[in-house]
Image (cartoon, helix red, strand yellow):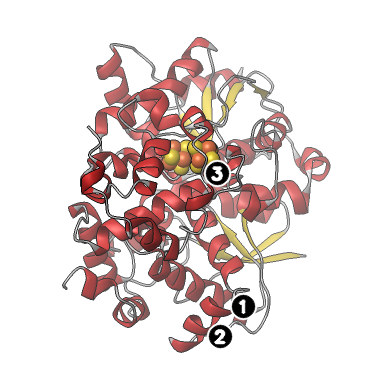
Amino acid sequence: MIDLRKSDPQFKWEIVKKEGGEGLLKCFGCSDCAASCPVRYFDERYNPRKIIRFTLLGMKDVVLKSPFLWFCAHCHACTERCPQGIRVAELINAIKNYAVEQGYCPEGYKMQIDLLMKMGRLYEVEDFDLKKRQRLGLPPIDKTIPEVAKILESTNILKVLKK
Amino acid sequence: MNKYAIFLGCTVPVRAQHYELSARNVAKELGIDLVEMPGASCCGFPLKAVEAETALLIAARNIALASKMKLDVITLCNSCTAMLSDAQAQLGNEEFHSKFKKVGLSYPNEVRVRHFVRMLYEDIGIEKIGKAVKKPLSSLKIMPHYGCHYMRPSNLYGFDNVETPHTLDELVSVTGAESVNYADKKMCCGGSVLGVDEELAITMANHKLSIAKDNGVDAIASICPFCTVMYEDNQRKAEAQFAKQYGIPVLYYPQLLGLSLGLDGNAVGLKFNRIKSDSMMEKLAR
Ligand code: SF4
Ligand code: SF4
């Protein structure tokens, strides 16, 4: 149930400020995004238009706490169809970024950040891998890229996740 | 001489060496020079949902490496292509550029980012590839799978047709194989959903697997390691979830192209494909 008494009028402005969120206010609710969405096609619990609608209505808790926000595959099918020229996939991504800031980061992503901090890549390059590469005639690759940790330390991301 | 910086990303050099191997060997056959990028890291895509700005900076750092080399970037993974293209575009934005400079990076020479397959299509071209084909795969029926970030978002790429893509179809046809035309060509593999809801992700992957089965294809042609994870590594799970039997090989496009250029199974790393392509190879030998 939508209870407008619980709405937060600031919510939409927070999203508009974020990278990718700039188009939010242009949405007129046509549902073309939902109609073109492959995730929605297979699972109606996910609906990009609804997420955008609730965001415009200031239903902050409903949007941020919903596990379905994370169902977006970032496939850009919606971006191609939106008659308002909204970068819909980027808008949903901006809402995800805001959810993270508010303390709703899925565990899987936190683990990936740990790996990137440690190695600068998602998969560990073991000696076995390097030997296999050599056997196949593939050039060697760096085991770690420490510059990535430097970038992570220079932005807000670690503070947001309290690392 | 076509010369490019090759960006490998995290997945390909560790989990999909057969993709890398076949791409490099195809490049050699076609006179393409792929130059290594020492110091290249993760493209940044895995962080985008957490904080886009950090992801963009990590991507832009990789672009900066290629920029110093004065070489355009070639990628093998669709998601890397999207992430690096996004960062490349953002470097034209003053606010982002100043953050980029603040972390000590510079972008001295403008460089482009493109997928390996797009480069084949645009820079080598169907005609020249056709002339290099020595062993046409005439007996094979292949289903091309584009993946989302090969041509979307169109405002970043301006390439192919997002509703009815055709470049990979043409590239499959030029090997001599029949490229299967089917509805829902642009459908997502479900890879991004795998960590969130496995059943749903498998349902998405199953959609194309069942189309492939209905069309009696010999193999699916993939151009992204994540799509391959969905169609090949998770094919068993799709079979279990939907009580179906598929057994459909999933080859990377350069593996197929390599075979048509006369490379042998080893040179395109066929033994590393999880679903064996023996019956496909027998058909070819006939
Ligand atoms: S397609 Fe665009 S305008 Fe229509 S509902 Fe979706 S975001 Fe809003
Ligand atoms: S980007 Fe997300 S919302 Fe848009 S079509 Fe793809 S899955 Fe649906």
Question: Which residue is at the front of the view, B13 or A39?
Answer: A39
Residue where numbered disc 1 is placed: B67
Amino acid type of the residue that numbered disc 1 sits on in the rendered structure: Ser
Between circles 2 and 3, the one closer to the viewer is: 3
Marks 2 & 1 on one chain: yes
Tag of residue A79 = 3
Disc 3: residue Cβ within 8 A of ligand 2's nearest atom: yes
- Where does residue B163 sit, x and y in percent of width and height? 64, 32
- Where does residue B178 sit, x and y in percent of width and height? 67, 21
Residue where numbered disc 2 is placed: B106
Secondary element type, mark 3: helix
CA separation in Å, label 1 and label 3: 29 Å
Left/right placement of residue B219 relative to residue B110 reads left
- Where does residue B80 sit, x and y in percent of width and height? 49, 57
Residues at circles 2 and 1 in contact by the CB criterion of under 8 Å: yes
* Residue B55 picture quarter: bottom left
Residue B134 visible in the shown view: yes
Q: Quadrant of the C terminus of chain B?
A: top right
- Where does residue B87 sit, x and y in percent of width and height? 54, 67
Tag of residue B250 = none
Tell me the residue at 48%/19% (across/down): B279
